[in-house]
């Protein structure tokens, strides 16, 4: 995760300004595959629940920059398992066999929470509700969604107290999609300071795409380009 995080801070690839329209077309297709309208919220909710789990144990939630909140120095591994909400709107006792699970594991080392968290989604079924999503990538309709595979998370701050407060880098590889179509995929994205970034491969390395409501910014080794999604013009 350290090498991956370094690319987000210092992109290695360059943008061919003479062929930027082709790059925008490929980026737009990649953006659809990332499911930014629901996946960041699912991970953020898991991190929030992980924070509650750590608090319940009486351990510190401070990261490497902070001091332990307890005088006793403790090493621990903390697991958080959440049964996914499923596709039904009918209130019921959560059913792990039908809805799948979402697991996160954190390590408290010398009384401090490590920056890296890992976990997995196992046949996790969830539902997109556009009116409650905190994503800047908006969806018009509710949808049944599924995720299955391992994931790694790097925290850019404390475990969040709310979904919208989460700041993290996610690396995922597995199956992702809707109730009627899933596919194998592998990608990473970052949620930081209220915006989404994702890594996009070019011929000589990687650039970073920052997603806004109506525009995207392309950060590359040879500069930053802001592009309007409607007019597909960049400057």
Image (cartoon, rainbow, N blue to C red):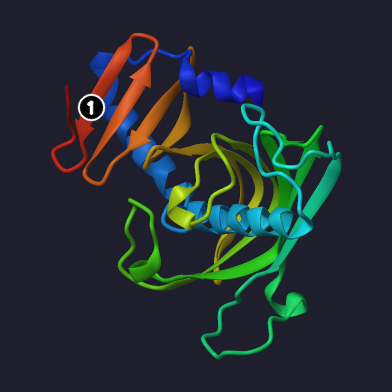
**Viewer-closest of 3 and 30:** 3
Q: Name, please, the residue furthest toward the top.
A: 222
Measured from the top left, where is residue 217 in percent x and y? 29, 29
Q: Position of residue 123 (x, y in %)?
A: 70, 65
Mark 1 neighbour class, 10 Å CA radius: few under 14, some 14 to 19, many 20 or more:
some
Q: In screen coordinates, is 210 left or right of 179?
A: left
Above-or-below relation of 143 to 23: below
Residue 1 at x, y percent in the picture: 66, 28
Residue 77, percent from left and from top: 84, 46
| Left or right, residue 149 beside residue 21 | right
Query: Which residue appears at 34% of the width and 8% of the height?
Result: 222
Decide if residue 206 is in sight here: no
Instruction: Give the residue drawn at x 43%, y 53%.
Output: 164
- Whether residue 101 can be seen here: yes
Q: Nearer the viewer, residue 200 or 83?
A: 83
Please report the residue visible at 65 percent of the width from the left and 38 percent of the height from the top: 62
Which residue in the structure is indicated by mark 1? 226
User: Viewer-proximal residue, 191 or 127?
Assistant: 191
The C terminus is located in which quarter?
top left
With respect to residue 174, does 8 lie above or below? above
Q: Quadrant of residue 23?
A: top left
């Amino acid at each position: 995760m350290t090498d991956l995080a370094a690319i987000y801070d210092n992109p290695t690839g360059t943008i061919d300004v003479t062929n930027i329209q082709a790059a925008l077309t490929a980026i737009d297709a990649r953006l659809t595959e990332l499911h930014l309208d629901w996946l960041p919220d699912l991970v953020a909710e898991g991190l929030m629940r992980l924070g509650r789990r750590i608090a319940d144990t009486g351990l510190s939630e401070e990261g490497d920059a902070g001091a332990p909140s307890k005088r006793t120095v403790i090493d621990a591994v903390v697991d958080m398992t959440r049964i996914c909400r499923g596709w039904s709107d009918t209130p019921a006792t959560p059913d792990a066999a039908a809805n799948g699970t979402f697991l996160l594991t954190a390590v408290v080392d010398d009384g401090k929470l490590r920056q890296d968290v890992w976990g997995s989604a196992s046949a996790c079924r969830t539902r997109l509700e556009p009116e409650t999503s905190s994503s800047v990538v908006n969806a018009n309709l509710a949808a049944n969604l599924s995720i299955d595979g391992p994931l790694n998370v790097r925290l850019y701050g404390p475990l969040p107290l709310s979904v919208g407060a989460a700041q993290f880098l996610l690396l995922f590889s597995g199956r992702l999609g809707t109730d009627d179509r899933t596919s194998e995929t592998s990608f990473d994205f970052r949620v930081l300071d209220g915006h989404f970034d994702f890594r996009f491969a070019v011929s000589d390395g990687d650039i970073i795409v920052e997603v806004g409501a109506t525009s995207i910014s392309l950060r590359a080794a040879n500069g930053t380009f802001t592009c309007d999604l409607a007019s597909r013009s960049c400057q």
